[in-house]
Image (spheres, helix red, strand yellow):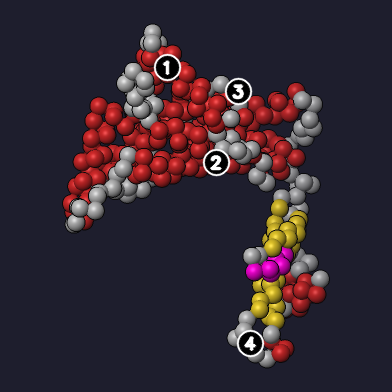
Amino acid sequence: MRFLSLAKSMLPPFCKSMVPMFQMMLTFETATIQDSTYKHPLLGTIVWVLVTVRLLPQQTAGMILTPRISQKAAGADILRIRRAPSRRSHPRLVFILLTGNSFWRLEMRHALFCGHPFLPERWLVLKEECYEVLLGVIARYEKEEKPVESGYGDYKHNMAEVLYDDVIMFRSMIKRAVQEAVPSGYALYAPPSVATQEACITFVKDRATLFLKDSEYLMGEPNEQGKRLNFGHLVLKQVCLLVYYPKTSKSLRNFPEFQDAVPRKALALVAAMVHFVLTLYKNHGKDINPNIISKDLEGAYNKFMGSMQKLNGHHSKGQRFKAMLAQWADEGM
């Protein structure tokens, strides 16, 4: 509390005069730093205070200050007072969503794969898919006899935006996982004998082209009979387990559709991402990390969905394909 008094005393006069009109939010960080540079006995231990002052309009007086204490590796004590939405100023469901509850976001990701993973224009998604997920979750709350306050409708656009942004972030997470898996999974690096940078780029381009030819990048390892299964490549398996089956509350493995087998739609999206990244290596000799454009993925995704449907219906390969997806899910669970 001595730090709190000190920080208030450090405020300029004009801020003090506006305290009755505004809600102030202060962030305090205190740390004890041992540094041999300071030889004076009074400065052997340095305590510093960082004060961040924000002036918020009166209507945000519902914001609360929540302390959070953690330890730095050097042993410093950190006290953070952070802003959080007030339960009194928002309906409970809105408060839960805006403060990071993963249940809503998980429902949106699940709805994405039950439908189509390529969302239309943002404004249309906010009005349709995102709002449908919100209504579904609210209906579940009511079915489970959990309290649902009136007034959440006033915040539906804000809640829909949170869900939409999370879906975009999730798709970017899949892309990052693919970007990390592709170079090593397909050995997209030149041997030491390749001396010049230009020769290295040419080598990588040629190797990526070789994998893309005849969809070699999708093929799994040979079985006992020497036969390889389409969509069985280890890179596809690695990415699927990483993004769909993490041991977290946001994991899609919490849904029955992901527990028995990896859904074909989920695998098709990963395969489309791999195709996208490999094409970058084919064209540039490296991953230039461009932004994802849905139309760049959707063509490959639709093609893969058609191929999987044919593969699934094959009299012998279909059983192997189903068994493979079930095995992947079992490993992820």
- Under mark 4, the amino acid is Tyr
Sequence-wise, the earlier of marks 3 and 4 is: 4
Dot 1 alpha-carbon crowd within 10 angstroms: few under 14, some 14 to 19, many 20 or more: some
Q: Please state the extent of the stretch shown in magenta in the rendering.
A: 74-81
The CA span between labels 2 and 1 is: 35 Å
Residue 32 in the image: x percent, y percent?
69, 75
Q: Are marks 3 and 4 in contact (CB under 8 Å)?
A: no
Dot 4 alpha-carbon crowd within 10 angstroms: few under 14, some 14 to 19, many 20 or more: few
Q: How many marks?
A: 4
Dot 3 alpha-carbon crowd within 10 angstroms: few under 14, some 14 to 19, many 20 or more: few
Dot 2 alpha-carbon crowd within 10 angstroms: few under 14, some 14 to 19, many 20 or more: some
- Under mark 2, the amino acid is Asp
Q: Secondary structure at mark 1?
A: helix
What residue is at 81 percent from the left and 71 percent from the top? 1
Q: Nearer the viewer, mark 3 or mark 1?
A: 1
Q: Nearer the viewer, mark 3 or mark 4?
A: 4
Residue at numbered disc 2: 166
Sequence-wise, the earlier of marks 3 and 1 is: 3
Residue 318 in the image: x percent, y percent?
41, 14
Residue at numbered disc 1: 320
Asked if residue 258 is positioned above or below residue 64 in the image, the reply reads above
Q: Are marks 1 and 4 in contact (CB under 8 Å)?
A: no
